[in-house]
Image: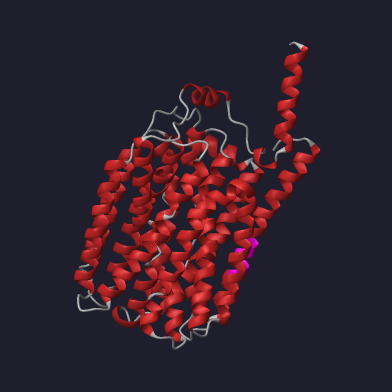
Amino acid sequence: MSMKSATHNTFTTNKKLNDPEELGPIPSSNSQTACSQSGPPDGGFQAWGTVFGCFLMQFCCFGYISSFGVYQDYYTRIYLTNYPPSTISWIGALVSFLADNVTLISGPLYDRGWFYHLVIVGSLLQSLSLFALSFAKPGQFYMIFMVQGVLSGIGIGIMYGPSLAIVSQHFSRRRTLVMSLVTSGTPLGSMIHPIMLNHLLNGTVGFARGVRASAGFVSALLLIACLFMRTRELPVPSVSYTAMARKCSREVLFILMTVGFLLCQTSYYFPIFYLQLDSIKHGIDVHFSFYSFVITNAACVTGRCTAGMIATYTGVLNFTIACAVACSAIIMSMIALSDVASVVVLGLAYGYFSGVCSALIVPLVTEFTPDLSELGARMGICFAIICGPISGALLGSQYRWWIPSLFSGLISLVGSSMFVVMRLMIYRRGINGHHP
């Protein structure tokens, strides 16, 4: 090797070690070769059409799950009055759990080229579950549980991960920004769906026809999404899913990131599911309480749309840490909810910071993925989290709001500390000149 070549290699290595955001796993030679031969176009009709389709998928997936607070309130007061809130919250908890954990299956299938099969089957299951829900009668908890909790959760889980991972096939330089725009479909759906559902369920339309109208709206959007999304040719993963899972289990940073997401997501849905009910139980006008989700999710849209731009300057991990800590403090502050002003302030603050955290999950996973052909499987591992109805059980029939608020806030704070440990490890390894 010539002296000039050796000097250039040494300079490149030192540059990598001194840049904390570059200390993720080094891409394999096969991945580098594939990228150099056919890198993401970072634009074009197919790329932006795929972004639009993915946006609609998020609108109809977690955007609809986040509107479960309307169902929680309606079931508690009208439709399932014989069941306590903690039991009813099992429905929303299960659909959230399955939506995340089914990614363990859909992720590896996506890596092996099954994208179109996954989004089509998932869309059909989501549409079928909503139409079936409209036939449920008052008091039929187990039918609602199976249809809205199990069937919808599986359908969303099948298409959720692939509809996020596909963006990485079309964008490279602007990947974080574009992914944050795609994930803004969730809070926008969380604004539109609650408004529709509140007026339909609590108006003259009624439960059956209201849910059918919502199902038709969601089905039309999912059809449009499936027609717009396109894939590009990528190499099939060279290792099995089991081998890759063992590989991930040896990556300390990836483990910390997964645990951090698990703990933060465990507390994430407490404000989403219970803010409307909390407002009503504190004597706040019912009509205003209906719009508490709208306030929260309007701020969430702003957070997700600006996350990519701000993270470009601060770094994805740094911005995640700041917003995760802020979410922890806001959740604990729900103890002070008592009037309209507190609902507005808490809704705006939590909406923005939780929106940023949600928007940065996939970019952070991508940043610590050495080979994009493994992205689907890694997302499946990272999203395999437990989101149980712990907050509903702590709330109880006496509605002691301070207990679940404090518990959820502390759990979120512990999750935030995992990201802080990641940052400290990256900084320390950068100083010592060792790669993770």
- Residue 206's place in the image compared with 261, above or below, is below
- Residue 84's place in the image compared with 65, above or below, is below
Front residue of 13/8: it is 8
The stretch drawn in magenta includes residue 274: no
Magenta segment = 409-415
Observer able to see residue 321: yes
Rendered residue at 43%/74% (across/down) = 292
Q: Furthest-bottom residue in view? A: 283
Front residue of 201/349: it is 349
Rendered residue at 39%/64% (across/down) = 190
Rendered residue at 20%/79% (across/down) = 204
- Residue 237's place in the image compared with 196, above or below, is above
Instruction: Find residue 96 and report its horizontal and vertical position in percent.
Output: 42, 60
* Quarter occupied by residue 142: bottom left
Instruction: Find residue 90 and report its horizontal and vertical position in percent.
Output: 41, 69
Instruction: Find residue 224 and report its horizontal and vertical position in percent.
Output: 26, 47
Q: Does 288 sit left or right of 228 as displayed? A: right
Observer able to see residue 255: no
Q: Does 38 sit left or right of 115 as displayed? A: right
Instruction: Find residue 390 and report its horizontal and vertical position in percent.
Output: 51, 70
